[in-house]
Amino acid sequence: MDDTVTFESFVADRLGALFRYALVLTGDRHDAEDLVQEALTRTGLSWRRVRRKDDPEGYVRTAMLRIMANRWRRPLREVSVAAPPEPAREDQALELVLADAELHTRLAALPPRMRAVLVLRYVEERSEQEIATLLGCSRGTVKSQASRALAKLRAAMEREEAGHG
């Protein structure tokens, strides 16, 4: 990446893709917004170093995964507010991701770690070893999480088909 790229131009260019990635990871629009904001805040603080890397977007995506992994390990401390700080904006690419409501609902029902493994494997097309490294677990854990997640998705589909048939 060009060493002169500003953080602001990087964010303007990649925000939509990063948000879609976070949405698939978290399963919730608000959690995805928080995740992107936290990852970009951390990246912005280190931008001089990050912009010199071959893949700043990969750096942000890895930051998101690590933030998610840390959230799994600690209790939830969420504070509700009366109104959002700014209005939501439309993103047609996001709408395409959300268009398959059934799949989105099924993915959102999975535990966060299983969902992350599936996103990394099938959306990001990462290898088992890459996923293990990103999530800080063994390759065997990645395999078992993927297998269990796919089994849960299949079971949900079978229950739905049996209910409609």
Image: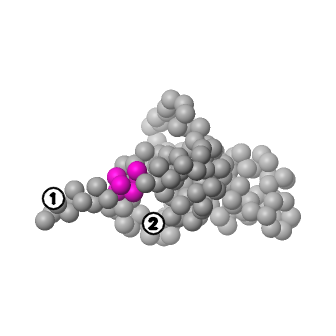
Answer whether residue 34 is visible to the viewer in this image: no
Is residue 43 in the magenta section? no
Q: Which mark is residue 163?
A: 1
Helix, strand or loop for disc 1: helix
Q: Which numbered circle lies on residue 30?
A: none
- Magenta segment: does it hold 151? yes
Q: Does label 1 or label 2 sit earlier along the sequence? A: 2
Residue 137 in percent (x, y) is at 60, 44
Q: Which residue is mark 2?
A: 97
On the picture, is 10 further left or further right than 3?
left
Q: Is residue 85 visible?
A: yes
Query: Vertically, is 52 above or below 40?
Result: below
- Give the CA separation, mark 1 to mark 2: 26 Å
Q: Is residue 72 above or below residue 112?
A: above
Residue placed most toward the observer, 136 or 44: 136
* Residue depicted at x 20% and y 63%: 161
Q: Amino acid at mark 1?
A: Gly
Q: Residue placed farthest to the front in the image?
A: 140
User: Image point 69% across, 60% down: which residue?
Assistant: 57
Give the residue at x 81% y 60%: 53
The local crowd at label 2, few if under 14, some if 14 to 19, many if 20 or more residues have their Cα within 10 Å, is some
Amino acid of disc 2? Val
Instruction: Report how many numbered discs are placed on residues in the image.
Output: 2
Please provide percent x and percent y for residue 124: 57, 63
Q: Main secondary structure of the magenta part?
A: helix
Residue 155 picture location, percent across and down: 28, 55
| Magenta region | 148-153
The one of 7 and 144 positioned closer to us in this rendering: 144
- Mark 2 element type: helix
